[in-house]
């Protein structure tokens, strides 16, 4: 029985996406895995084409579907939601700068099954030293607890339950936004669901590998917000 639809949106970040798809090929769950190539450079496209059979993922080139420039996260979510609803299973997003462990996906699935009120279930992110990092650096106490959170769950490695998918149509997401984790986290709570952060499921995260300019937010926040304002980029 299919346990989940998993998706990874890819915009270059070739060094990390190699590890992302390899790790998901080793997951201990029955999944269907889709990689969405969002107008990457030729080297990334060639790699994905050459490894789709090796690592067992279905490859969708968004250039074959839309002429809208990257990022096309709304379109990816719409397609993925349709697939998950058709298969009557949850949707799990694993971004291209995240490396899961073999038991990460089964852990998220187990918690989502046990917590009938769950809307989103997210794995906490760590750096190479095992420290909690962006976007969960605000968590200071290291433990294996699963906690209800009022913070937004990033889509780094996050499960969206079938119940939530059945109640909220991603086609209603704003066309003026680039990213939707904040909005979807809030919508989950507004619909009466609880969002869970799983501190016992750590995934390695290398933030903003596909869009390194976003690291300006931490190195030079003034320049970041100037770029964001004038270029109308990174709309949340």
Image: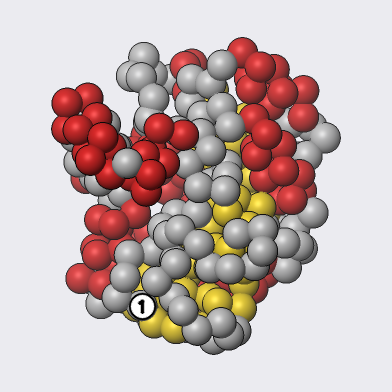
Which residue corresponds to the image point at 79% horizontal and 54% vertical from the top-left? 26
User: What colouring style does the render use?
Assistant: secondary structure
Return the residue nearer the eye: 174 or 201.
201
| Quadrant placement of the N terminus | bottom right
Disc 1: CA contacts within 10 A as few (<14), some (14-19) or many (>=20): some
Note whether residue 181 is visible.
Answer: yes
Q: Horizontal placement of 154 versus 104: left or right? A: left
Position in image of residue 203 (x %, y %)? 62, 61
Return the residue nearer the eye: 88 or 158.
158
Return the residue nearer the eye: 1 or 184.
184
Secondary structure at badge 1 equals loop
Position in image of residue 197 (x %, y %)? 46, 74
Q: Horizontal placement of 26 versus 211: left or right? A: right
Position in image of residue 90 (x %, y %)? 51, 61
**Picture layout, residue 119 above or below residue 167:** below
Q: What is the residue that sits farthest to the right in this orientation? A: 54
* Residue denoted by label 1: 149
Note whether residue 92 is visible.
Answer: no
Q: How many marks?
A: 1
Which residue corresponds to the image point at 67% horizontal and 58% vertical from the top-left? 128
**Picture layout, residue 8 above or below residue 135:** above
Which residue corresponds to the image point at 64% horizontal and 67% vertical from the top-left? 130
């Amino acid at each position: 029985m299919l346990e989940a639809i998993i998706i990874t949106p890819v915009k270059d970040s070739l060094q990390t996406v190699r590890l992302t798809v390899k790790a998901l090929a080793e997951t201990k769950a029955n999944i269907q895995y889709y990689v969405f190539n969002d107008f990457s450079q030729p080297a990334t496209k060639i790699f994905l084409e050459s490894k789709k059979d090796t690592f067992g993922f279905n490859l969708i080139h968004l250039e074959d579907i839309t002429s809208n420039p990257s990022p096309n996260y709304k379109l990816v979510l719409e397609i993925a939601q349709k697939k998950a609803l058709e298969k009557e299973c949850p949707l799990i997003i694993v971004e291209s700068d995240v490396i899961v462990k073999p038991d990460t996906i089964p852990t998220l699935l187990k918690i989502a099954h046990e917590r009938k009120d769950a809307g989103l279930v997210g794995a906490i992110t760590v750096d190479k030293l095992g420290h909690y990092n962006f976007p969960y650096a605000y968590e200071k106490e290291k433990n294996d607890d699963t906690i209800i959170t009022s913070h937004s769950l990033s889509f780094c490695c996050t499960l969206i339950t079938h119940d939530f998918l059945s109640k909220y149509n991603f086609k209603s997401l704003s066309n003026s936004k680039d990213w939707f984790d904040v909005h979807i986290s809030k919508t989950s709570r507004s619909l009466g669901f609880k969002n869970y952060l799983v501190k016992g499921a750590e995934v390695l995260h290398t933030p903003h590998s596909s869009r390194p300019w976003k690291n300006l937010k931490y190195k030079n926040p003034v320049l970041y917000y100037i770029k964001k304002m004038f270029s109308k980029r990174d709309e949340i």
